[in-house]
Amino acid sequence: MPHPFEIELETTLPANPEQVWEAIATGPGIDSWFMGRNDIEPRKGGVAAMDTGGHREEAVITAYEPGKRLASRTAAAEDGRFMAFEYLIEGRAGGSTVLRVVQSGMLGDNWQDEYDALRRGWPFHLHTLQEYLTHFPGRTGVPVFAVAHGKSMQDVRAALLRRLALPTPLTVGARAQAAPERLPPLDGEVVWADDERIGLRTADGLYSFHQGPTGTALMFHHLFAPKTAGAEAAWQQWLTKLVS
């Protein structure tokens, strides 16, 4: 039986409303901080699409007010499940912007687990948006996605800490280093650390590593370097070897 839900968050961003709009309402902007590869048809009634590892999700844009409001909604599934998103933008003195995000809809039978995952994920994504607007303003990131399956969440976490040369316990501000094959060396700082996610910032990218409860390992990176050809395949190889 579907279950209604709503999650609402608010954050202050170091950018003006036009810059925030570019980040949340265009495909290249969303690619620079969120998940997957994104396309936005810029009009009410247009399509907002996200492709993650070959899985495409689409939503219809229900409100499109540049610099102010963007909203979308997916089609309802046979069991009544759907997702709706709303972004509200308000400029503040000094060039900053308040962004309010509301996600709502209907969840399925395992709605509590789904709700908890969504509730935990949004603060991380908004933090990544803040990192993007602070450290890479005006630039477009190339999204990198990879997924692999390990034995357990604990094994994946331990392997990530080891391969990234990170300390235990992990804290924000720690230095990370890695040397992936066919990629430039990674040398960065931990900007997010919790039980499920590790977020890193380097001079040319935002890197995130996620551990799922069943041993799934995910990566959502945003690369701002001039040369990124082959990066996704190289990171997929790195992650697969990590959990094997």
Image (spheres, rainbow, N blue to C red):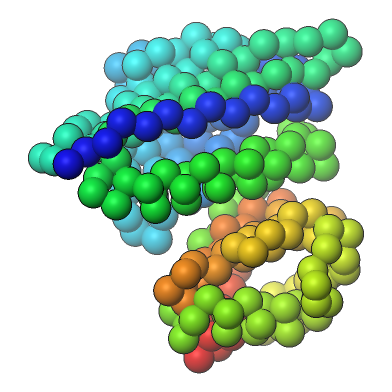
Q: From this viewpoint, is residue 189 visible?
A: no
Total tally of numbered discs in the picture? 0
Image vertical order of residue 174 relative to residue 224, above or below: below
Q: What residue appears at the point 42 percent right and 29 percent down from the top-left corner?
A: 6
The residue nearer to you, when weighing 170 against 28, is 170
The residue nearer to you, when weighing 6 against 244, is 6
* Quadrant housing residue 3: top left
Image vertical order of residue 242 relative to residue 177, above or below: below
Q: What residue appears at the point 53 percent right and 27 percent down from the top-left corner?
A: 8
The residue nearer to you, when weighing 165 against 6, is 6
Image vertical order of residue 208 relative to residue 78, above or below: below
Q: Tell which residue pokes out farthest to the left in this image.
A: 78
Q: What residue appears at the point 47 percent right and 51 percent down from the top-left corner?
A: 117
In the image, 34: left or right of 132?
Answer: left
Q: Position of residue 171 (x, y in %)?
A: 83, 63
- Quarter of the picture containing the N terminus is top left
* Quadrant housing residue 220: bottom right
Q: What residue appears at the point 88 percent right and 59 percent down from the top-left corner?
A: 173
